[in-house]
Amino acid sequence: MSEYSIDTKLVHAGERRQTPTGKSVSTPIYPSTTYTYDSMAEMDKVFSGEGGDYVYSRYGNPTVNALEEAVAEIESGKFAVAFASGMAAIHAALFACELAPDSVVLASQDLYGASFDLLKKIFGSYGVKTKTADFNDLKNLQAQVEELKPRVLLAETISNPLLKICDIEAVAGIAHSNGAKLVVDNTFASPFLCQPVRFGADFSVHSATKYLSGHADATGGIVISNDEFDKPTLDGIKKLVGGVLSVWEAHQILRGIKTLGLRQEKQCRNAAVLAEHLSKNEFIEKVYYPNLDDKKSADKVLKDDFGGALVSIKLKTDTTDAAWKFMDSLKLCVRATSLGDVYTLVSHSASSSHRELSPKKRASLGIADSLVRISVGIEDVKDLIADIEQALKNG
Ligand code: PLP
């Protein structure tokens, strides 16, 4: 489907599978955990890999495979492997980079908190070292890569919660010229806005729980790679660590992908209007939005003139209390820790995604006590503005 635009791929990729009753328009759910064959000889062929058919759900499932094919197609990767969550996907991508004791992972300082914990608590217990850098300061990043000689660089397309854009092409260049791999968490952008492997990333990963699914009703993760050589490793992790995506979730996510383009266009348009509007609000100190803060990078990395569908705000009264009062006064926007859903969700970074960090560390990263992240949904933006304005006034 490479000749088609992303909107068309989102609708059709991974579909039209052969079933006993013909080619299905939408992929059926195959809940069977195991498969039988007419003879042991035939079964042996399948077990040896010669048959190319299904054996057992942890090894592979037709519905999950349809999702994997769809995501590989829309992210312009060679293949994709699905996992039970975004964290399982990040673990698999890092593992596939062949980390060994004393290997260094150089992570973006703005990384999602659980990814840091994964590096420190799980990979760290095997001797892998984690260092951090500001991935928006390319000169300094280059110097750190030359000094630390990391095995892997781990970045996010759009950072949380300050929504800084990573120049993936430049970071991939720095990584590769120093023998490192680049893993990009593309969750905040989604494949609609960015396809990291096209910019040179070795792996792109998603929490499919967010934009791909889009309705707050499925948990999943997926790794996209541009190198067939990685496939046996990623399949092996799926099979042996066992963090397989449930067939029901695969169906929900595959269904969600059909409307990703529609949803994200509306979400991004809403976010742009909201950001513009809130930047004039008397109770707000600063609005964080890629198209306001760093349009050049947004234009390079994100599709068309979209700036993403997340907006963060810092209140003039910079306290947790002020942020909570504002959030408690919201009537339409939903207080919840996730993002990327059709509903507008708001979260307070200091007490959720970044609560494990000391106040000093948060301050050094620019994460204010009053910072609230808004994952903009598909509602009428006028209703969102009215709700947020009344909450700022009454909070
Ligand atoms: N990556 C990012 C950027 C996230 O925000 C999250 C979850 O919030 C994850 C990964 C982990 O995804 P999951 O909750 O599906 O494991």
Image: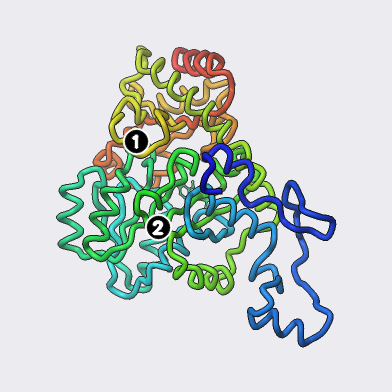
Point out the frontmost of discs 1 and 2: 1
Q: How far apart are marks 1 and 2 (CA)?
A: 20 Å
Q: In this view, does 354 lie to the left or right of 132?
A: right
Residue extending furthest toward the front: 3
Residue topped by disc 2: 117
Instruction: Give the amino acid type for the residue marked by disc 2 in the picture.
Output: Asp
The image shows residue 340 at horizontal and vertical percentages of: 53, 37
- Residue that appears at 48% across and 72% down: 233
Q: What element carries label 1?
A: loop
Disc on res. 300: none
Task: Pick the residue in front: 241 or 113.
Answer: 241
Q: Are marks 1 and 2 in contact (CB under 8 Å)?
A: no
Residue topped by disc 1: 162
Residue 90 occupies quadrant: bottom left
Q: Is residue 83 above or below residue 161?
A: below
The image shows residue 171 at horizontal and vertical percentages of: 27, 51
Q: In this view, does 247 lie to the left or right of 146?
A: right
